[in-house]
Image (cartoon, rainbow, N blue to C red):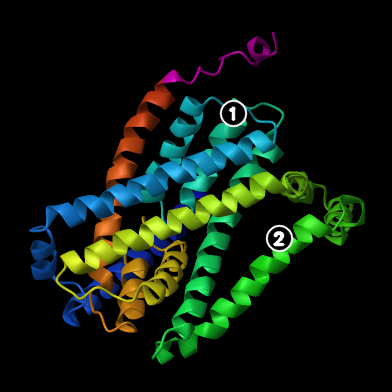
Amino acid sequence: MKKRNRLKTSFVTLIKLTLVVVLIRFLADKGFLSIEAIRRALEQPERIALALLALTFGTVFSIVRWQYLLRAQDIHLSWGKTVQLAMIGNFFNIALPGAVSGDFVKAFYIAREIHGQRARAFGSILFDRVAGVSGLVLISALALSLSRLESGGPSQFTAISAFVVVAAIGVVGFFGYLFLVPENRDPLFVLFEKAENRVARLGSFKRIYIGLRHYHHHRTTVLRSLALSLAIHALVCFACLQLVVALGDQPLSLPALFTVVPLGLLVTAIPVAPAGVGTGHAAFGALFLLLGSNMGANVFSFMVLHGLLVGALGGLVYLRFKSQLPALPENPSDAQS
């Protein structure tokens, strides 16, 4: 059985890697990935530095956001420990497929750090991801509205407008439900409770939902987290603008850029390759093409570079953190004493 699972995992990994190679080759053949453009961008180190600095500030803000969410759950980690766990998560974002893989690793380690509060720890991580995705949707919807107000606004957004509007309605609906529905009248909680009564193992989903629902009492923290999410994505869009100019393209319309970049980031969450390689290149290439630019894939390459640098630093943190973990006792009775 184990051998069969290993073969299945290897086969799936091979398919994913093949898909990534095919995507990158296709983008290169179509001129979306250009070594010459990247070399030209490196001749403007001040813009590259500004872009990387903006992305770094975005990383710092994401750690601050998670710390706020942890404290709302009565989980009081030191800033040093929060930074440590966040950096470990960044490392596994590049070591494992998808941009959300590090979340699972953070959940595992924080459960070891905070005994008896696993559900609340998972709730903070899940809500951190919800706040991040919500920020992407809201900033894209706001920018789309502004682009419509511009004279001669991009009509090519018609194809994605429906998705952005539906997603924005979903975000508003989620937070409306969280804030307005009392806990003692929550039909979802009743649903999870019935599921647990039928299948005991499903109780973990109820406990995680309770951890998520906990933010009903912390509206200020939720609004602060959303504000930080908007700031993070604004910094990413600013970085993309700098990279586009450095790559030799004309500055793009800010509302248009703020519309498509968040959508491209959403695609990177698809667990195909580490750091969203391949899928992110394809998404940014296609979305930037709507703006009349073929530099989207090149822009994402620099974003991947920043992710690799942060992830490598997280790898060093992980090695130090792992060496500090206490060894499990050989005799089970020792663990109870």
Give the residues drawn in magenta, as a range.
324-337
At a point 68% along the width and 37% down the height, the residue shown is 72
Residue 114 versus residue 237 in the image, above or below? above
Residue that numbered label 2 is attached to: 175
Q: Which mark is residue 112?
A: 1
- Secondary element under disc 1, as helix, strand or loop, is helix
Q: CA distance from mark 2 to mark 1?
A: 30 Å
Q: Nearer the viewer, residue 92 or 16?
A: 92
Which mark is drawn over residue 2? none
Query: Which part of the image, by quadrant, shows the C terminus?
Result: top right
In this rendering, does residue 279 appear at all?
Answer: yes
Q: Is 221 displayed left or right of 312 in the figure?
A: right
Foreground of the two, 260 or 110: 260
Q: Is residue 330 magenta?
A: yes
- Which x, y percent locates residue 298? 22, 68
Q: Residues within 10 Å of mark 1 (few under 14, many from 20)?
A: few
Q: Amino acid at mark 1?
A: Arg
Residue 129 in sight: no
Which numbered disc flags the more N-terminal residue, 2 or 1?
1
Residue 114, percent across and down?
63, 27
Q: Is residue 140 magenta?
A: no
